[in-house]
Amino acid sequence: MTSRNLAVALGACATMWLGGCSDNTTAPQVEMAEREIAAATAETAALAAEVRQLAAAAGITALQRPAPVRPQLSLLGQALAFDKVLSGNRDISCMTCHLAGAGTVDGRSTSIGQGASGLGTARVHPQNKFVHRNAPSLFNLHVMSPLTWDGRVFTDAGGVVRTPGAPLRAGQRAVLEFGPLSALPMFPVLSRGEMRADAGNELAAVADDQPQRVWKFLMRRLGEIPEYRTMFESAYPGQTFDNMDFAHAGNAMGGWIAAVFAFNNTPWDRMLAGNDDAMTEVQLRGARAFLGSAKCSMCHNGPLFTDRKFHNVAVAQVGPGFGDGSDGRDDFGRMRKTGNSADRYSFRTPPLRNVELTAPYGHDGAIVSLRSWVDHYSQSDAKLRSYDAGQLEPLFQGTVQSTAEAILLTRDSRLRRLVLETQTVDEITEFLKALTDPGARDMRQVVPVRVPSGLSVDGAP
Ligand code: HEC
Ligand code: HEC
């Protein structure tokens, strides 16, 4: 019996007893229950202590919140992130894919970009087009580098923000206050599938190798809206709008994301801080397995549960892919950046805080439930070979690449011979739910009522 069940049983009995139970055998029962509770509590405390020790050994420390972001900068970032004016045909905003009312994701295996209508699971594209990958959440990115599933935006060893796809000018880099998080928002606006579109607007007409020109045209658009001029100038005191660059816009969005999506008030955090009752006994057992026998923390460590490195954990490739392989529907992951075939099918270890809220999972959303994701690590070679496309939405079911054997060639050696009992899978799944901050369950309060362009605001599905 868990201590929680005991507490309920005791509560019921004690009420009866205090209410004056005529049957005086109740009193000794209460004493027995109290002794059992004391034993269970001691057991939970011991387990919590063990988990704290294992966490420290794995380098899983408390998560610090970001330093306060100046309100005018954050307000500008919020407006831009929700404003469809940043997309070529003014039909999609950042937050259409990173829905504030849905864990900052869209609930799809891979996202649907511009030219579509509807939100979240109801979003449809007239030509059934999807973008290359699953939209990651925006949680706790104030301490995250590298960004994206293959680490295209990152801080190098010298502390310089790198964006190999489209190098930034020194003057642009000087504007970035929040590291890679300030630079990242400069890139979705360049992508034709995500925001820019193939035709129909002045941004789409720019050649793909002219990112600076797209950014310049975007600033021209924003400058036509007087409210934005005022907002930029209050966000960057002493500077005039006409001397600003899209890096100022990216930096504002990065600052806003850092400020509003940082969450460190989870049962896990309270347990780490010394509260033995913050997590359930099942969650504590799951944590012990995560940190020990199941080997999860060999990759998922640090305050965000990521080693910030790249690994192949035997995930089926589904969806449109990223232009790799013979038919262009494959995604070589980290190898796209390094050119090293040992990195084929490796992706960044994702952070796990609030992971309960961000299904489907993996770089392509190939696994739709949290429990199935945990379970896939058990005999992951067999699981990959017998991957069930039936879990996917109908449009994805016929898109599974028959690359299981190629994927297994570079699978991380730590997954070899890893077998998890059903009960362990259940316990680890429950543990992952202890990483949810109640504040992240519904963030609709960060959705503005209106944006300066006057275009519609997408906040919740
Ligand atoms: C069409 C949907 C879509 C739109 C619109 C979109 N994103 Fe994303 N976002 C994604 C996807 C998919 C990725 C992963 C890209 C990859 O790994 O190649 C991503 C990655 C990110 C990341 C990196 C997260 C991480 O953990 O590495 C951030 C931050 C982000 N987007 C913010 C933004 C901002 C700001 C905008 C608007 C300027 C935006 N996104 C527009 C889908 C979208
Ligand atoms: C060898 C390193 C490694 C080990 C060990 C590992 N993971 Fe992962 N994990 C990853 C990588 C890499 C991904 C992303 C894979 C992809 O998208 O193709 C991932 C993805 C995840 C996700 C999906 C998160 C999301 O946002 O989509 C969860 C949940 C997860 N791991 C939990 C676990 C658990 C639980 C264990 C232990 C049973 C574990 N991991 C063991 C590296 C690892």
Image (tube, grey):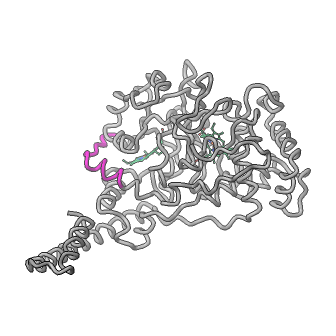
Q: Nearer the viewer, residue 308 or 426?
A: 426
- Image quadrant in which the N terminus is located: bottom left
Across the whole image, how many numbered discs are drawn on residues?
0
- Image quadrant in which the C terminus is located: top right
Q: Main SS type for the magenta part? A: helix
Q: Seen in the image, is 10 located left or right of residue 154?
A: left
Question: Percent x, y for residue 315?
Answer: 44, 35
| Quadrant containing ligand 2 | top left
Examine the rendering and report whether any part of residue 38 can be seen. Answer: no
Question: Percent x, y for residue 27?
Answer: 13, 80
**What residue is at 48 percent from the left and 26 percent from the top?**
396
Q: Is residue 422 magenta?
A: yes
**What residue is at 89 percent from the left and 53 percent from the top?**
241
Relative vertical location of residue 270 with respect to residue 311 in this rendering, above or below: below
- Residue range in magenta is 416-430
Relative vertical location of residue 209 with respect to residue 421 in this rendering, above or below: above
Q: Quadrant of residue 58?
A: bottom left
Q: Quadrant of residue 168?
A: top right
Q: Quadrant of residue 388?
A: top left
Relative vertical location of residue 361 with respect to residue 316 in this rendering, above or below: below
Question: Percent x, y for residue 130?
Answer: 59, 29
**What residue is at 10 percent from the left and 79 percent from the top?**
22
Q: Seen in the image, is 97 located left or right of residue 418?
A: right
Q: Nearer the viewer, residue 254 or 115?
A: 115
Q: Is residue 146 magenta?
A: no
**What residue is at 70 percent from the left and 53 percent from the top?**
78
Q: Seen in the image, is 317 located left or right of residue 255?
A: left
Q: Seen in the image, is 211 located left or right of residue 41?
A: right
Question: Percent x, y for residue 31?
Answer: 15, 79
Q: Nearer the viewer, residue 78 or 337?
A: 78
Examine the rendering and report whether any part of residue 188 can be seen. Answer: yes
